[in-house]
Image: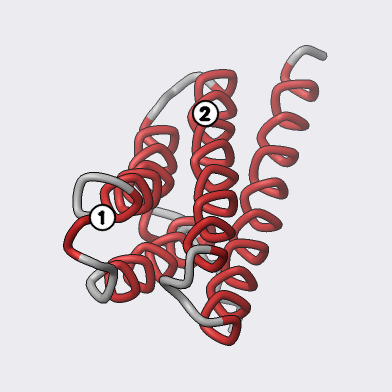
Amino acid sequence: MNFEFRIRSFTDLNAWKEGHALVVELYQMTARFPRAEIFGLTNQLRRAGVSITSNIAEGFSRNSLKEKVQFFTISLGSLTEIQSQLVIARDVGYIQKEEFDKIAQQTVKVAKILRGLIKKTGLMIQNSRF
């Protein structure tokens, strides 16, 4: 039997699944940050994380391939924000090197998947012009 997997929802996208795993890790990690950071780094990390999965979901629902690429690219920008903020959290002592390494690896994984999604969608745009 040949079963073809069809992506029916944004939750079927690997970029969304891995992004969601990252968001969960961010929430767990920032729950241990000092209370003084609730409106600072904690809020920034959580908002940027939620932005990743939200923009993937919104891009998925768009009919235009160009709009899809735009939203997926915004997700990548939010991911880069997180990478920068994680360095700050590590350097001020809010997270240890081991935790930083683990979550940083997840950001790299999400970035690779997102870049692939952007590239594939971009190729679909090019192919539709012919």
Question: What residue sits right under mark 1 in the picture?
Answer: 37
Above-or-below relation of 48 to 104? above
Q: Is residue 108 visible?
A: yes
Above-or-below relation of 4 to 68? below
Report the amino acid beneath label 1: Glu
Residue beneath the point at 55% across and 24% down: 70
In the rendered structure, the answer to whether residue 118 lies left or right of residue 24 reads right
Q: Nearer the viewer, residue 43 or 88?
A: 88
For the image, the number of numbered tags is 2
Residue beneath the point at 43% across and 43% down: 56
Report the amino acid beneath label 2: Lys
- Which disc is residue 92 wearing? none
Task: Give x and y (percent) for residue 54.
Answer: 33, 42
Label 1 environment density (alpha carbons within 10 Å; few <14, some 14–19, many ≥20): few
Task: Give x and y (percent) for residue 111.
Answer: 65, 54
Task: Give x and y (percent) for residue 1.
Answer: 59, 84
Question: What residue sits right under mark 2 in the picture?
Answer: 68
